[in-house]
Amino acid sequence: MGDTTAKTAKTAKTRRQPARFGQLSLRTRISLLLTAVSACLTLALGALWLQDTRASIDEEITAGTRVCEQWLTVLAGELNARPDAAANKQLLARVRAAGRIRANALSAFDASGQVLYVSPGPRYKAGRAAPAWFARLIDPHVQPRRIVAGGLTLILTPDPSRASVDAWDSAQNIMLWACALLALLFLAIRRLLDRALAPLEQIRGALERTGRGRHDLRLPVYAARELNLLAHAYNGMADRLELAVSDNVRLYSECELAQLMQSRLERERRGIAQELHDELAQGITAVRALAGAIVQRTAGQAALHGHAQSIIAVTNDIQQGIRHILQQLRPSCGDTEHLNLAMQRHLSLWHRHYPQLALQVDVCGDSAHVDDTVALALLRILQEGLTNVARHAGAAQVQVALRLCRQHDGDWLELTLADDGRGLPPGAAQPRGFGLRGMRERALALRGELSITSQAGQGVRLCARLPALGVRLDETNGS
């Protein structure tokens, strides 16, 4: 359990380290990276310097040891020529007079191994020594020399300690200069990056301004090619966003204008319907009552009686016509059942005018509340669609379907009108004509959608999808 906890803590610590490094700015990270690369190059140069220094010390110590060995060999030859006690004393005297011999320590022993002489320690940078690890790196490892001179034994031991101290002092100076230069390099790189990446702050400000819905700012041309590409891409994006916003504003204005015009048109239709009901209906009722009175009082006058009955029949026809006109001007559709009846009345009247077209009707059987505005919009779309079929399609069959779709965001009504005519010419499916554009605007004004698909020789399929309860234009804008 303890091992698992320790491993988990170690993993979390390892994950936190990159997070802390990621908090550094881009300028700092690039500066650190370039400085680290320079430090690696400096270390490589230091390794080369260390190798050259070791070779130089090796050459120096070897040369000094060789010279000392030759000199001592000459002295040993003279002592071997006349081996006596005086010659030994003379050799020791000459060795003591020489002292320390060029980076070598000299020791003299008699035949019994007793130490007769040891050369003094170095006076150059006395008391100082390089670190042991550094001395091991540059120590040439030259073997001691053993020279036998009569009854004396001379041991010549190479001593690179002074050369190591000199090398250590040089290495310290080099490290200090390298650290200073690396620090200056870091500051210089940071300064240059600050100047080179300064436009990024301007680009960030422009993006924030764009995020707040302001698209009027444009970036200038920069000297750096990469930043100039970013500026060019941003300017293009801002141009497209500004154009899209302008199009949306224009579309909203057009939808608002279309809704206002439609609302005024519907008010005028309601006014006309009211006038027809109040004025004509009462007058027709009065005429019918008078004609009925004449019929009752002229039973013995055949000619007059027949004309009075004709008047009653004509008034009945006029009443039926006015009732139909009132239904067209102001249909009353509070739910799907009333909407179905209104659609079927219009389809029956249309079929009487165009009996050569086979009509198939499929209306929804579910009941749901339908907003009058939505019902009226569906009736108008149906009327315009059937008019287009009769005028332009050249079809033999028309299919009309009304479905109720229950979804999580409410009830939706889907009206489908399909024919088997010649289809639309290429590009005509876009709402360019007044009729198609009017249908599209009706659907959009109620937060619905209208789609038109067509294939040459296979007819046209029009599908309008509207929310059953409708929506106001200000609600669409607020969403």
Image (cartoon, helix red, strand yellow):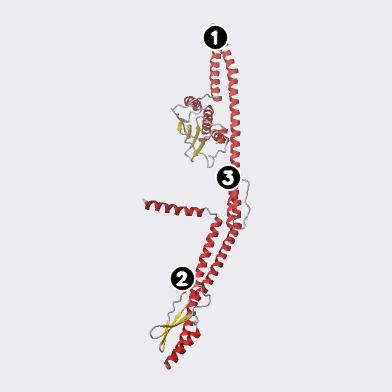
| Residue pointed to by mark 1 | 295
**Residue nearer the viewer, 202 or 391:** 202
Count neighbours of disc 3 (C-alpha within 10 A) and say few if under 14, some if 14 to 19, many if 20 or more.
Answer: few
Q: Nearer the viewer, mark 1 or mark 2?
A: 2
Look at the numbered discs 3 and 1 and tell me whether their residues touch, using CB distance below 8 Å.
no
Give amino acid for label 1. Val
Q: Residues within 10 Å of mark 2 (few under 14, many from 20)?
A: few
The image shows residue 301 at horizontal and vertical percentages of: 55, 7
Farthest bottom residue in view: 82
Q: Nearer the viewer, mark 3 or mark 1?
A: 3
- The residue lying at 60 percent from left, 23 percent from top is 271
Residue at disc 2, secondary structure: helix
Quadrant including the C terminus? top right
Mark 3 vs mark 1: which is more N-terminal? 3
Q: Amino acid at mark 3?
A: Gly
Asked whether 293 or 367 is in front, the reply is 367
Q: Residue at x 60, y 52 (%)?
A: 201
* Position in image of residue 453 (x %, y %): 49, 39
Q: Secondary structure at mark 1?
A: helix
Mark closer to the chain start, 2 or 3: 2
Query: Is residue 337 in view?
Result: yes
Kindly identify which numbered label has been placed on residue 132: 2
Q: Which mark is residue 211?
A: 3
Q: Are marks 2 and 3 in contact (CB under 8 Å)?
A: no
Label at residue 180: none
Compared with residue 439, is residue 78 higher up or lower down, i.e. above or below? below
Point out residue 149 in the picture as x, y percentages from the top left corner: 42, 88
The amino acid sitting under disc 2 is Ala
- Secondary structure under tag 3 reads helix
Tell me: 66 left or right of 202: left
